Image (cartoon, rainbow, N blue to C red):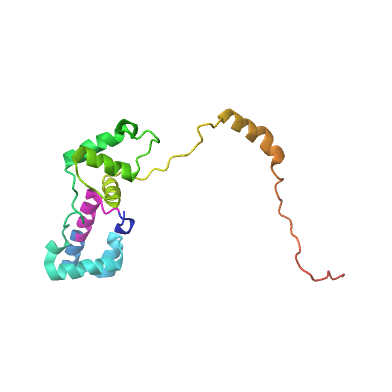
């Protein structure tokens, strides 16, 4: 996940990126070129150039991870409690109108459980950081009758459906045909 997607890196992804930077530092010391390092690590050359500049200015310590961009407000125990409650579903927390966790609902739940304020965007980042993703449920009318739909598809639709067009060359030209 990229920062442009507003999710930040998960701790595992941060660790992986730090390993890449430290591996690059070893190659910087050995005199390898930027293009070669970028190819080996499968990153962009500009990324390697930025790492090299940081390495020159601050050594290997400059390439170590500085932790998440924004410090998480929830402790691991609070997150575990929140995750347990999220798995119980919205109905268990008084959201009876539909069974989806909207960010606003999760924000409300965090406030009730641990008395910590998050913004809607912050809730989205928190959930993505912990591996939760946006889910779009398949929407079906409650009045939907599967048997009636199946009957319509098998009997009515073939009669109503226009015939399939076949490919045949046609002329859209105003030119007259030459007799030969």
Residue ranking furthest to the right: 179
Q: What stretch is highlighted in magenta?
A: 7-21
Q: Report the front residue among 158 and 45.
A: 158
Magenta stretch: includes residue 125:
no
Q: Is residue 113 left or right of residue 160?
A: left
Whether residue 17 is situated above or below residue 100 in the rendered picture: below
Relative placement, left or right, of 4 versus 111 is right
Q: Position of residue 100 (x, y in %)?
A: 37, 38
**Does residue 31 appear anywhere in the picture?**
no
Closer to the camera, 164 or 143?
143
Q: Position of residue 29 (x, y in %)?
A: 15, 67
Q: Is residue 6 visible?
A: yes
Instruction: Determine if the magenta segment contains residue 8.
Output: yes
Quarter where residue 60 is shown = bottom left
Figure check: 42 above or below 34: above
Q: Which SS does the magenta portion mostly show?
A: helix
Q: Where's residue 111, x and y in %?
A: 23, 42
State the residue in front, 93 or 26: 93
Q: State the residue lying farthest toward the top.
A: 147
Give the x, y percent position of residue 81.
Answer: 21, 36
Answer above or below: position of 86 versus 12.
Answer: above
């Amino acid at each position: 996940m990229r920062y442009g997607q507003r999710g930040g890196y998960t701790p595992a992804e941060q660790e992986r990126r730090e390993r890449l930077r430290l591996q690059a530092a070893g190659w910087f010391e050995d005199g390898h070129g930027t293009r070669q390092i970028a190819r080996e690590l499968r990153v962009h050359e500009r990324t390697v150039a930025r790492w090299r500049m940081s390495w020159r200015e601050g050594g290997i310590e400059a390439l170590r991870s500085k932790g998440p961009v924004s410090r998480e407000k929830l402790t691991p125990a609070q997150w575990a409690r929140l995750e347990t409650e999220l798995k119980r579903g919205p109905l268990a927390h008084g959201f009876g109108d539909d069974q989806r966790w909207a960010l606003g609902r999760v924000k409300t739940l965090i406030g009730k459980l641990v008395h910590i304020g998050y913004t809607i965007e912050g809730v989205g980042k928190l959930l993505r950081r912990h591996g939760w993703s946006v889910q779009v449920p398949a929407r079906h009318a409650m009045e939907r009758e599967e048997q009636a739909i199946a009957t319509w598809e098998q009997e009515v639709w073939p009669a109503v459906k226009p015939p399939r067009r076949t490919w045949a060359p046609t002329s859209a030209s105003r030119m007259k045909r030459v007799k030969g």
